[in-house]
Image (tube, helix red, strand yellow):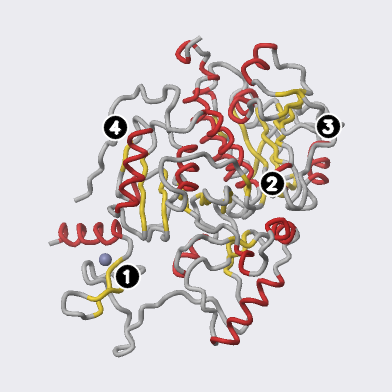
Amino acid sequence: MFPTDTMAQGHEGAEYGFAFLDEDAKRELRRSIFKAVCIPGHQVPYASREMPIARGFGTGGMQVTLALLGPRDCVKVIDQGADDSVNAANIRAFFSLTCPGVSGTTLTEAASVIQTRHRIPELPLRNDQILVFQVPYPDPLVLVEPNAATRRRMHGRADYARLWVKLYEDMVAFDEITISHRYPTRINGHYIIDPSPIPRYDVPKLHQADCLYLFGAGREKRIYAVPPHTDAIPITFADVPFTVEEFIDRKTGKRHCCRRCGATDSFLDEFPDEDGNRVFQCSDAAYCDSRLMQQEAAE
Amino acid sequence: MSVIDLPALWRPENHQALFRLILDATARPGQGADLSPHLGGAHAALGALATFCDNTQTLADLTGTLTDADWRFLDVARAPADQAAFILAQGSDAPTFQPRLGTLDAPEGGATLIVKVASLTEGQPLILTGPGIKTTTSLHVTGLAPDWLTARARWCADFPMGCDMVLADDTSVAILPRTTKITEG
Ligand SMILES: [Zn+2]
């Protein structure tokens, strides 16, 4: 049920050419990652390399991951919470081809590096784990300012007045902040980041975490970071508190539960079943599977 | 020379391993990282330079300890301290230079200082707070002239501008990103 596949055998893997990118490219990525951790939330530029998949399919996250990986790593790739989507499986296959010795896993707790699109795993990440986000749009100020140089100047001065105004107008128009994904989040009291298209449910996990979060945007050629034990506060207004998805059943007033594992403490995907009924299921497949395993073991 | 014949410090797999140790130490300021398994007997400061330097970068060696062979392997351009991306300095000598601090628009241009110290396990503790540190942590260091702390506080006073410090004894490093606040314990 949990294939912890060894992606490639052989420990001669650390020869020149490991991890697809040349050593100069990896060194440049590592310098940018280092500065990104030193300046939490700041989008550090780097020279994005051509990757064998189209930009927009996670090239930024892949380049960050390739700059990290060594033959002792165990890597997990998730897309919308699932390990087995085509996108996640392709990226994991690419790591296995290019990083001899690196093992693959679907288990959150077994991974040293996790690359993700759209979710943070339910299981809290430890201090020996790194989560790498694939980022389509790194700059939250794009909403209010088209000029990149002006946006850089606004970020440096933490000049976010126009972003606040935009959110406030939203709030007045809709009675709530309507952002469901990519919620603007302030890091260490200075930079506001786009935390990538994670749901609001995942945003609080960025705050004072044990693990390191790295963000790679391939098209915009930017890397940024939220270090462990760093403040990450979703921006909001005094009279409109930040809220996360609650999955409350309007009829019963109770929280929906996962139809597979029964969880009432996970982020749920909603879809119609064969009979057209709305059903709910854990978006984090590894979390759902591990709960099922525990239940089977207990029987 | 094929890559197999390279001294350990200049082999790509050691650069990857050194980077991960340095990254972890950067994410957790003050937490020492033992680099010795990947140094091939070299000083930890040279290990940090080997991880980051290449022919796109600039380095000022204020210690005069880098050999001609080190410079050849690093393949990095020489620059005065006030212009260099990387500065190698002796912790026992009070700093008399002004490093690059970056700009508000591009604070990543602030220099990375690699400072050789006598020990990262002995001496009066420095108390550290800031990103990467849950509450406070203490860093023991000897061989760092007190002027370094006052100079660093001045250089890092205007976040996001500043410089980032890698303290290195013979075999290990501890890192002080520009966000780390230091008080003497
Ligand atoms: Zn479930």
Along the line of sight, the residue nearer the viewer: A205 or A273:
A273
Q: Looking at the picture, which amino acid does disc 1 mark? A: Asp
Spatial separation of the CA atoms under disc 2 and disc 3: 21 Å
- The label on residue A8 is 4
| In the rendered image, residues at marks 3 and 4 fall on the same chain | no
| In the rendered image, residues at marks 2 and 4 fall on the same chain | no
Q: Is residue A285 above or below residue A37?
A: below
Residue A294 % position (x, y): 21, 58
Badge 4: how crowded within 10 Å, few (<14), some, or many (20+)?
A: some
Q: Is residue B8 above or below residue A225?
A: above
Q: Residue furthest left?
A: A299
Spatial separation of the CA atoms under disc 3 and disc 4: 49 Å
Q: Looking at the picture, which amino acid does disc 3 mark? A: Pro
- Residue topped by disc 1: A269
Badge 3: how crowded within 10 Å, few (<14), some, or many (20+)?
A: some
- Marks 2 and 3 close (CB-CB < 8 Å): no
Residue B110 % position (x, y): 74, 41
- Residue topped by disc 2: B127
Q: What chain is tagged by disc 3?
A: B
- Residue topped by disc 3: B95
Q: Is mark 2 on a helix, strand or loop?
A: strand
- The residue lying at 76 percent from left, 28 percent from top is B91
Q: What chain is tagged by disc 1?
A: A
Q: Please give left or right for residue A237 compared with residue A62 in the image.
A: right
Quadrant of the rendered structure where residue A17 is? top left
Of label 2 and label 3, which has the lower sequence position? 3
Spatial separation of the CA atoms under disc 4 and disc 1: 33 Å
